Image (spheres, rainbow, N blue to C red):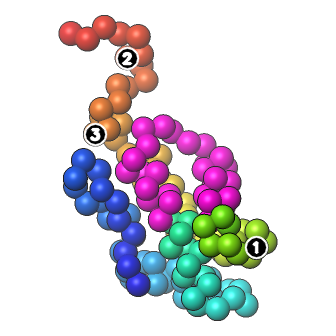
Amino acid sequence: MAELTGLQRGVKIQVMNNQELNRAVQYVTASTSYGRETVTDILKTGLGELTELAVESSRQFERDALLEYVSQWTIKRTGQPETLVREVLGCAGRWLDEVYEQVSKRPTESLDVPPQDDEGAEPV
């Protein structure tokens, strides 16, 4: 099982290691009636998209909007029914929240985005 990583300015950023991803898959598989392969595909797709957002986007997202986007993305990418994807992602809420925390806490200065309180300020 591959770890969830992304590249930011050519630097590899690890969001979730293999052990954490495997733990999430085991937990969700034990909590639902879905097979390990299905759960793995859904979690890797959903968490992978969150990872990409964490390293590529300069926008701040509200949790609910971000999780809705990830759910819809995962449904389209995996071809799995909406109820199945939402149940699997819901069971993996703890891990989704951990990745969301990294998305929301990432330093904006590393993305060359001026801090919000400097909006409209002229460069020095």
Element on which disc 2 rests: helix
- Total label count? 3
Task: Report, in whole angstroms, how far the alpha carbon at label 2 lies from the one at label 1.
Answer: 44 Å
Query: Of the numbered discs in the image, which one, if any, rests on residue 110?
Result: 3
**Residue occupying image coordinates x 50% and y 60%:** 49
Whether residue 114 is visible, yes or no, is: yes
Name which quarter of the figure residue 83 lies in: bottom right
Residue 112 located within the stretch drawn in magenta: no
Q: What is the residue that sits farthest to the right in this orientation?
A: 83
**Residue occupying image coordinates x 56% and y 79%:** 41
Task: Report, in whole angstroms, how far the alpha carbon at label 3 lies from the one at label 1.
Answer: 37 Å
Residue 109 shown left or right of residue 96 in the figure: left
**Residue occupying image coordinates x 68% and y 59%:** 72
| Image spot of residue 34 (x, y percent) | 69, 88
Residue stretch in magenta? 48-74
Residue 112 shown left or right of residue 102 in the figure: left
Element on which disc 3 rests: helix
Q: Main secondary structure of the magenta part?
A: helix
Element on which disc 1 rests: loop
| Image spot of residue 25 (x, y percent) | 54, 83
Disc 2 or 1, which lies upstream in sequence? 1
Quadrant for the N terminus, please.
bottom left
Q: Which residue is mark 2?
A: 118
Residue 72 shown left or right of residue 110 in the figure: right
Label 3 amino acid? Answer: Ser
Query: Of the numbered discs in the image, which one, if any, rests on residue 81?
Result: 1
Q: Residues within 10 Å of mark 1 (few under 14, many from 20)?
A: few
Whether residue 99 is visible, yes or no, is: no
**Residue occupying image coordinates x 59% and y 75%:** 42
Label 1 amino acid? Answer: Pro
Disc 3 or 1, which lies upstream in sequence? 1
Task: Report, in whole angstroms, how far the alpha carbon at label 2 lies from the one at label 3.
Answer: 16 Å
